[in-house]
Image (cartoon, rainbow, N blue to C red):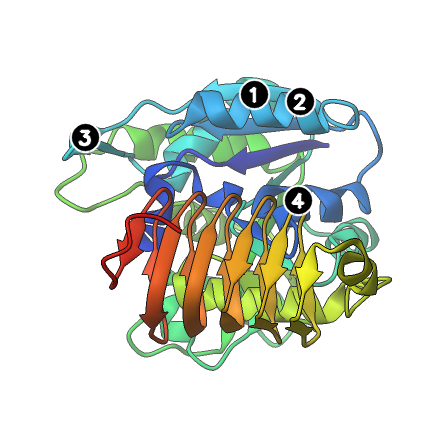
């Protein structure tokens, strides 16, 4: 089975963090998002599985990192999706459908599993594979019941629990089954899938339009191909927006097992001085925390310095330096310097410098 990961997009909804890195490289609970996703895949797919990454924005950064950190397990391939154009030096692309089309030559006589880099299931992907192999169907779509299906691709089922419709962001959803970041197409369907993707690719796009995968799946359904759903019972974390990133951080921290949740070893070593850690908190390497209260639900990257801070429900990037900061529900980018600030819901990009005092440095 071939795995396909479209990872070309710029992550506009996560700007300013994605000005300097792809959204899949945001670090939460001690790992980059793409690391969390690939760790889940390792629980479901054997060593040596082929993964084709469709890269575009920050392609070199993605390629070098994945080769360095994941080539020991997966057989990695990279294909480039060219930008459709640029807005203020930021590229934009023609959509998920065109990204998947690029992998056509890799999928001959094979099943393909498509996953998104900003969706992380709290379960692994084993169940979707089981559902495919134990049922007579052409494909399986991963879904989750949600309260706001109008923001997602929505699945409608017939009386036999076969997919009869898939609609992208309907104004009046007829079900609450939201498509949730993974699709499995059997080899019986992949030739026609890529034929339809090629036909779609030839259709000119107007401003803001994209070539999607949803419309192609709907055409496959009309042609009689049989899709089943795999319903995830546990949460599927969507890291596409700042607020959902913080929600995902809370859930990941509640799941990971930290041997020293109050970080007594760091207190004894002098890395944490006159401070209180309120679990769950993840603390990276090379940190200095002084006169602070940290937690709950705080992820701290590597080489971070915190002095006289009170932080909860926050994600702090690598190399950040914070002094006299009181905040919650905030995301602070890598190598940012903040000083003398009391504010909720701070969103600060990488390498920023903000101070309300007359001091020149921390």
Closer-to-camera residue (255/285): 285
Q: Is residue 85 above or below residue 324?
A: above
Q: Which residue is mark 1?
A: 64
Q: Which residue is mark 2?
A: 68
> Which of label 4 and label 3 is nearer to you?
4
Closer-to-camera residue (271/86): 271
Check whether the beta carbons of the residues at disc 1 and disc 2 lie within 8 A of each other.
Answer: yes
- The alpha-carbon separation of the residues under discs 3 and 1 comes to 23 Å
Q: Earlier in the sequence, mark 3 or mark 1?
A: 1
Q: Which residue is mark 3?
A: 89
Quadrant the N terminus occupies: top right
Classify mark 3: helix, strand or loop. Answer: loop
Q: Earlier in the sequence, mark 4 or mark 3?
A: 3
Residue 227 in sight here: no
Classify mark 4: helix, strand or loop. Answer: loop
Q: Which residue is mark 4?
A: 286
Closer-to-camera residue (75/296): 296
Count the labels in the image. 4
Classify mark 2: helix, strand or loop. Answer: helix
- The alpha-carbon separation of the residues under discs 4 and 1 comes to 24 Å
């Amino acid at each position: 089975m071939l795995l396909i990961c479209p990872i070309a997009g710029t992550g506009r909804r996560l700007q300013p963090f994605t000005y300097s890195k792809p959204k899949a490289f945001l670090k939460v609970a001690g790992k980059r998002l793409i690391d969390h996703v690939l760790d889940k895949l390792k629980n479901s797919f054997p060593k040596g599985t082929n993964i084709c990454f469709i890269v575009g924005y920050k392609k070199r950064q993605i390629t070098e990192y994945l080769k360095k950190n994941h080539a020991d397990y997966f057989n990695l391939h990279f294909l480039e999706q060219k930008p459709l154009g640029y807005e203020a030096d930021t590229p934009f692309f023609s959509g998920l459908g065109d990204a998947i089309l690029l992998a056509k030559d890799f999928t001959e006589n094979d099943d393909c599993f498509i996953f998104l880099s900003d969706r992380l299931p709290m379960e692994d992907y084993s169940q979707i594979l089981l559902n495919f192999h134990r049922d007579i169907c052409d494909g399986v779509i991963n879904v989750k019941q949600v309260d706001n299906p109008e923001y997602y691709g929505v699945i409608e089922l017939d009386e036999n629990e076969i997919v009869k419709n898939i609609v992208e962001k309907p104004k009046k959803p007829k079900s609450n089954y939201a498509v949730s970041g993974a699709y499995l197409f059997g080899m019986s369907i992949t030739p026609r899938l890529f034929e339809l993707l090629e036909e779609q690719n030839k259709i000119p796009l107007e401003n803001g339009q994209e070539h999607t995968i949803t419309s192609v799946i709907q055409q496959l359904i009309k042609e009689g191909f049989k899709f089943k759903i795999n319903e995830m019972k546990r949460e599927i974390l969507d890291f596409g927006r700042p607020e959902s990133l913080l929600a995902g951080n809370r859930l990941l921290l509640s799941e990971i097992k930290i041997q020293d949740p109050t970080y007594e070893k760091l207190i004894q070593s002098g890395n944490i001085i006159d401070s209180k850690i309120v679990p769950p908190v993840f603390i990276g390497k090379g940190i200095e925390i002084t006169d602070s209260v940290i937690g709950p639900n705080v992820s701290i990257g590597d080489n971070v310095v915190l002095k006289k801070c009170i932080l909860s429900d926050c994600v702090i990037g690598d190399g950040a330096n914070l002094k006299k900061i009181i905040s919650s529900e905030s995301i602070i980018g890598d190598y940012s310097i903040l000083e003398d600030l009391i504010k909720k819901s701070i969103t600060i990009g990488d390498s920023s410098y903000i101070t309300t005092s007359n001091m020149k440095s921390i």
